[in-house]
Amino acid sequence: MFGARFRRENSIWLRDNRRMATLGLIEYQHASSEVRAVFDDIMTTRQTDTINNFWKALAHDPKTLRRTWQSIKEIMAPGALDAVTKEMIYLAVSATNQCGYCIASHTAAARKAGMNDAMLAELMAVVGMANETNRLASGYQVEVDERFRS
Amino acid sequence: MFGARFRRENSIWLRDNRRMATLGLIEYQHASSEVRAVFDDIMTTRQTDTINNFWKALAHDPKTLRRTWQSIKEIMAPGALDAVTKEMIYLAVSATNQCGYCIASHTAAARKAGMNDAMLAELMAVVGMANETNRLASGYQVEVDERFRS
Amino acid sequence: MFGARFRRENSIWLRDNRRMATLGLIEYQHASSEVRAVFDDIMTTRQTDTINNFWKALAHDPKTLRRTWQSIKEIMAPGALDAVTKEMIYLAVSATNQCGYCIASHTAAARKAGMNDAMLAELMAVVGMANETNRLASGYQVEVDERFRS
Amino acid sequence: MFGARFRRENSIWLRDNRRMATLGLIEYQHASSEVRAVFDDIMTTRQTDTINNFWKALAHDPKTLRRTWQSIKEIMAPGALDAVTKEMIYLAVSATNQCGYCIASHTAAARKAGMNDAMLAELMAVVGMANETNRLASGYQVEVDERFRS
Amino acid sequence: MFGARFRRENSIWLRDNRRMATLGLIEYQHASSEVRAVFDDIMTTRQTDTINNFWKALAHDPKTLRRTWQSIKEIMAPGALDAVTKEMIYLAVSATNQCGYCIASHTAAARKAGMNDAMLAELMAVVGMANETNRLASGYQVEVDERFRS
Amino acid sequence: MFGARFRRENSIWLRDNRRMATLGLIEYQHASSEVRAVFDDIMTTRQTDTINNFWKALAHDPKTLRRTWQSIKEIMAPGALDAVTKEMIYLAVSATNQCGYCIASHTAAARKAGMNDAMLAELMAVVGMANETNRLASGYQVEVDERFRS
């Protein structure tokens, strides 16, 4: 009887842990030097000592890991738009797509870049309204105004 | 012969024009006083003398017209985020949803609020990248990092 | 000079017409007997003498044509839900997905089944609101209430 | 000792709770009078003594809470469409967008409004089919029939 | 110590079980003969002795169960495209839609059909890139090239 | 009278042409050397003498042009998956997202890589079915099978 309960308990615990990335996560200590180089650059650029699960999952495909990181590094660097604006746009897209992982990670990233609760609230209000009017415009089959075509 | 060509020419013109909103567009001069009040407020608030087709299409449902305008007026007013940031977030959502009408109208609105070509280009780069990584995170079934849950 | 204008005129007309389905449309008179059997059943079931472009495009793949028609015929038949409710749900999905063709064709179908302008307006208001709150719920990462899980 | 163990137990339970709304949930007893007024109206209108997590999460932004509730209250009231039809359309949109929270809460709401299992099944069949044909129409690049444009 | 384990066990177990399909799952032994006939065909066709939760959930609507299975059986059979290509396309769509259930089940199905880790990685890279450029094309309002319209 | 007709005719032609990319298209002869280098690489790699409008639109942002092309070039090169499979996956994603431009351009690209009409038809059938069952799985709130989590 105890055995039965114990097995059940373990299987529950394991089951919860097994909700993992398709190919699993590669931790720094088990990573190839190619992957470590990207992980190092991520930690240096972002001034952190942690690597998000996203990168650990992509590490199974070092080419995609490297390319995706290089693209994000280039795109998210301050330019005509500052860092917090870029992170909020990233979050707005993720909320629109309803990507759980990305909403969680980019809420954290946007906050780190300076988004406070009031900014988050206004961001979400705009995201909600845009998603509403996108469907009203499409649903009513509204034709584009002539002056928006020039 | 001229007649035949003329009719064909006309049929082209008409066909193009018939790509119109499901219920048609209500112009100011044909609008009820309830609708005109909203149109007036839109033109005053936005300091313009034109009404977008979107509002003319919604005018068939005065309650939705009024409610949608009131919500947008409240949401898009500068607060914790400034007007151009809000318009860019609106555009980012519209590009993600691929709403043709909304991309056209909010590109114009964002520009009016101060978005230049360089800002547009960076905005689109972030939108593209976010849409890419949203699917990588979901496709690889990446579990949310513990520290993003607190 | 007239010739030049005429050719330009023609090129407009042709270009517009060339926006056609990938594999083109198969008209009844050119259809195989297998395709004609489906077209006949569509016209009989829907009590009409026209075939939508959708079916004419699918006619290039008779198996998909037959299977899709059989499925729609079965699903859209009145049952626990009546015909107009089903057509309105179809339209709500199409507006959410922003499928231009489907919004156009199912607006027509819903009207034929009994949807009037007031019903259309309320339908679109619900569609818009649902698309808004879907993103607010996801964007704020709201956890499902315990009582909705049982 | 029991205390320590109990807390650990609680901490597991809490961890589940920590998968919580970005800004957390505001319970009635901790809510401002502005928020309580909305909560009271929700409970009165819906004839219930519970507040969904969605509203508790939005309570961090009282303006959005109020506006969203007022809009939903207005839109979901019976009019040209009855309450259960409106809730089923809401559910159809939520299923199309795959919003977990909204599917759970609006399945409950639609049932409360009168949707039974047979209606749910037919609703989902329509939603599935519409999502399929939306992509067939787009994928085959089917042009809109002339008669749907008038 | 036992007490701690026991309580932990119970609270976890209950929580996990309550995340279930709207109408629950129908197991083979409780299924009607109509449902069993479909279950039998699934197991024979797929050479397996397990039925996915998806089919167990659909079993509440035997007509949708039968029609969906017949469609999938017909569509996924090798033809102009082989089985693994079809499963990978299914997975690409599911990752684009971010359907958690479908990503999990079709990752398994694609692997069973022959997809290895390298193929999965390239598939996801294409899915990510396509989602990115879809929004760049829409966001920049790029008009279709003349030569793609013929 | 002729003049009036002529102007109307012209206005049609112009209006059609004005449906152009937000920032317009940059042709080779007006491109900077940085942009020309990318255009040259595209034409060499793809063995063509035409540049798609997509690249001409992106040319306004040379960094995004270069990065996007480099990524596509790397991702779409044959590897564990061959070229036609990759192009079909690209098309499957574009059809799911209903991106008009991308469906048109990647239908052409997939055909150039070897996709025939029968393959296109099977591809679209899978895309349609996947979009249907994605919503059935989400709509019925089907929980992931234990064996898909390992």
Image (cartoon, coloured by chain):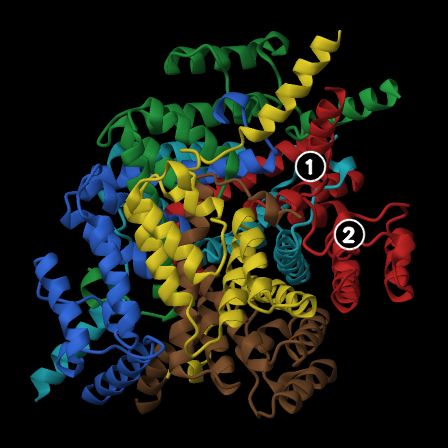
Chain colours: A cyan, B red, C yellow, D brown, E blue, F green
Q: Nearer the viewer, mark 2 or mark 1?
A: 1
The amino acid marked with disc number 2 is: Leu
Residue B25: mark in rendering: 2
- Please tell me in which quadrant of the rendered image residue D98 appears: bottom left
Q: SS of the residue at dot 1? A: helix
Residue C27 horizontal/vertical position (percent): 43, 39
**Between F26 and E35, the one nearer to me in the picture:** E35
Q: Residue at x 42, y 84 (%)?
A: D116
**Marked residue nearer the N-terminal end (2 or 1):** 1
Q: Residue at x 61, y 88 (%)?
A: D46
Residue B135: mark in rendering: none
Residue E114 horizontal/vertical position (percent): 14, 43
The amino acid marked with disc number 1 is: Asp
Residue C9 horizontal/vertical position (percent): 68, 20
**Between B141 and E83, the one nearer to me in the picture:** E83
From this viewpoint, which residue is outermost toward the front? B1
Q: Circle 1 sits on which residue? A: B16
Q: SS of the residue at dot 2? A: loop
Q: Residue at x 72, y 43 (%)?
A: B105
State whether residue C107 appears in this view. yes
Tell me the crowding category of disc 1: few under 14, some 14 to 19, or many 20 or more residues within 10 angstroms, Cα based.
Answer: some
Labels 2 and 1 in the same subunit: yes
State whether residue D20 appears in this view. no
**Between C61 and B86, the one nearer to me in the picture:** C61
Residue D74 horizontal/vertical position (percent): 70, 76
The N terminus of chain E lies in quadrant: bottom left
Q: Is residue E12 above or below residue F36?
A: below
- Please tell me in which quadrant of the rendered image residue E26 appears: bottom left
Q: Residue at x 54, y 66 (%)?
A: C88
